[in-house]
Image: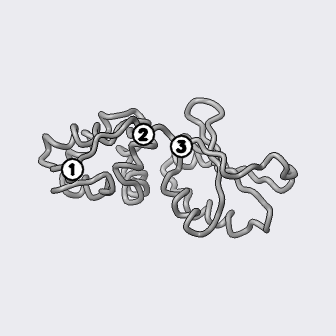
Amino acid sequence: MKITAQTKISELIKQNPAALEAIVSINKHFEKLRNPILRKIMASRVSIADAAKIGGCKVEAFYEKLAPLGFETVNQVESQKAEPVITYKLDISSIPPERIKELDVRAGIASGADPFLTIMKEIDLLKSGDVLIVINSFEPVPLIRILEKKGYDFRTEKPVPNEYHT
């Protein structure tokens, strides 16, 4: 199978189940993929490039681990380490605390639950000027992309190791 940075993790695993262990060996963040429920939730939404951002590693690390399994890279381009995006597009310093709601999804993800519908429900309940802070153990790149397409502004910060506020 020919792969690019945009290839979904689910496609890799479907093509060759051994890809799961190859990916898990890249970074401890990918251990969650061993959980069948989390794998089903995450793998179909996350590309190689997204996973590299989430794990803070290079896309090339995926190419190197997957090549022995028969995956061929198309348009391989050297890149630097994909650091998590810490961005401040949205300034919330002037927003009153009562307009800010926090939603911590870490426990749900750890137990195998998909927080996507819960997050989207909370987004739908927001009034103009309200803010939802999603607390996660990784940068939710696919969620950010979906919400950007819907016109939402976002801000991501990492206040402590393994905790992202988006």
Q: Which residue is identified by label 3?
A: 85
Identify the element where label 1 is drawn: loop
Q: Which residue is identified by label 2?
A: 82
Q: How far apart are marks 1 and 3 (CA)?
A: 30 Å
Residue 10 coordinates in the image, percent (x, y): 31, 56
* Residue type, numbered disc 3: Val
* Residue type, numbered disc 1: Pro
* Residue type, numbered disc 2: Ala
Q: Which residue is identified by label 1?
A: 17
Instruction: Residue 67: name its quadrant.
Output: top left
Colouring scheme applied when the structure was drawn: one colour
Q: How crowded is mark 3: few (under 14 residues within 10 Å), some or many (20 or more)?
A: some
Label 2–label 3 contact, CB within 8 A? no
Q: Quadrant of the N terminus?
A: bottom left
Closer to the camera, 91 or 71?
A: 91
Residue 119 coordinates in the image, percent (x, y): 62, 60
Q: Residue 52 carries which label?
A: none
